[in-house]
Each structure stands twice: as C-alpha cells, then as structure tokens.
Image (spheres, rainbow, N blue to C red):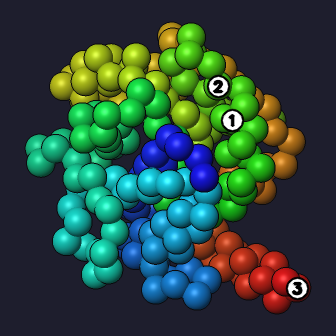
Amino acid sequence: MLDLPCILFAGGKSSRMGQDKSLLPFGDYPTLTQYQYERLKQFFADVYVSAKSRDKFNVHLRVIEDPETSDFAPTAGFVAAFQALQHDRIFVLSVDAPFVEEEVIRALLAADAPHYDAVIAKTASGTHPMVGIYHRSLLGELQRMLSQGDHRLGKLLSSSKTCYVSFENEEHFTNLNHPNEYEEAVSRYNDENKTK
C-alpha cells in the first residue's frame, strides 16, 4: 500500500459533458467516482474525494469539501486537501481519468524527491497536471492563486521545481470531457474486462 494519500478530484462543472460526469455510471459501479475510489483503494492506504459538497454522493466516501465560496477549480481542492491532511505530499487524479494504471502511479512515485514541488505525468500531447504528486511547499502559492481566482496549474508548475515524467501511452491519460469520450471509455472498459 502506498503511504501518501490519493485525492480524487470530482468537483468540476462538467459543462462540456452536459451533466455531472462524476455521477455517471462506469463499469460495475453506479458512478465514475465510486469506480475510481474503489480502484484506487487497491493501491493507496487513504483515498479521498475532493468535491464542492459531499451531499451529491449517496454512498459513504471520504470527501474533502472545497471552501464554500470557491470557484469550480482544482486550486480549491488542493488548498482544502493540504489544510485537512497532515501529509507533506499528495497524489492527485481527476475523476475523469479512469485508465491511469498502477504502473503510471508507481513511475511517478519513483521519480519523486524531497527537493521537488511536484512530479507530473507528461506525454507527446502535453503535460497532465491532474495526474501527479504535489508537495506542501506549493500551498502558499495555491492559496494566493485561489484568493485571486487564478487557476492556471500549468503556469504554477512551470514556475516551480517540477519533475515531468514522460509516458508513451496516451491512452492512460484519456479524459472524459464530452459524451462521446465517455461512451468510448465505457466500451473500452467493457471490452478490456471481457478478456480478463
């Protein structure tokens, strides 16, 4: 079991999906959030869900709520997570990235070191700020960003001591932003699990 906590970010607006994607069914689970939560519990001793409110989930999940007045943005989740937990680093994953495998997580952890502020996945298509490790050293800057309504994680990472870990397989980092991407992901999941 990995000893740093995993924060599953499920507090976005889902405007491109047209409905709350964190509550869409996935695999054998009633929601994508529950699927991700149960899957990640196989690797991490502690898994938390970052969301605007715990009330939208009808099952018991360990939820860290965003500050009440905050925007729909990851910066609120980062600040709330570091304030709620005592850990010096957290692993973060967006709820809509269901194909990030254990091998990716372990590669990011293997690259981590105390002098880094963050360790982030990267592929040919670009960086993936919501797949990686963030250190408490970033909390002050995240608080400043949140107070100013600045949610540019890419800018934060580029101006911090960030280690980018390259991966070749883009499919690990598929995000479900639009209905067709969700449908394709469900089909892919079903096809992969038929062969197991």
Q: Counting residues from the N terminus, which is met first, the one under dot 3 or under dot 2?
A: 2
Q: Residue 121 sits in which quadrant?
A: top right
Q: Residue at x 46, y 45 (%)?
A: 5
- Marks 1 and 3 sit apart, C-alpha to C-alpha, by 28 Å
Q: How crowded is mark 3: few (under 14 residues within 10 Å), some or many (20 or more)?
A: few
- Marks 2 and 1 sit apart, C-alpha to C-alpha, by 6 Å
Q: Which residue is drawn at 72% across and 31% down?
A: 110
Q: Residue at x 12, y 48 (%)?
A: 68
Residue type, label 2: Asp
**Left or right: where 17 falls relative to 64:** right
**Left or right: where 46 falls relative to 52:** right
**Residue that mark 3 sits on:** 195
Identify the secondary structure beneath mark 3. Answer: loop
**Left or right: where 188 falls relative to 137:** right
Residue type, label 3: Thr
Quadrant into which the C terminus falls: bottom right
The residue lying toward the viewer, choosing from 138 and 123, is 138
Instruction: Say which mark, if any, is on residue 108.
Output: 1
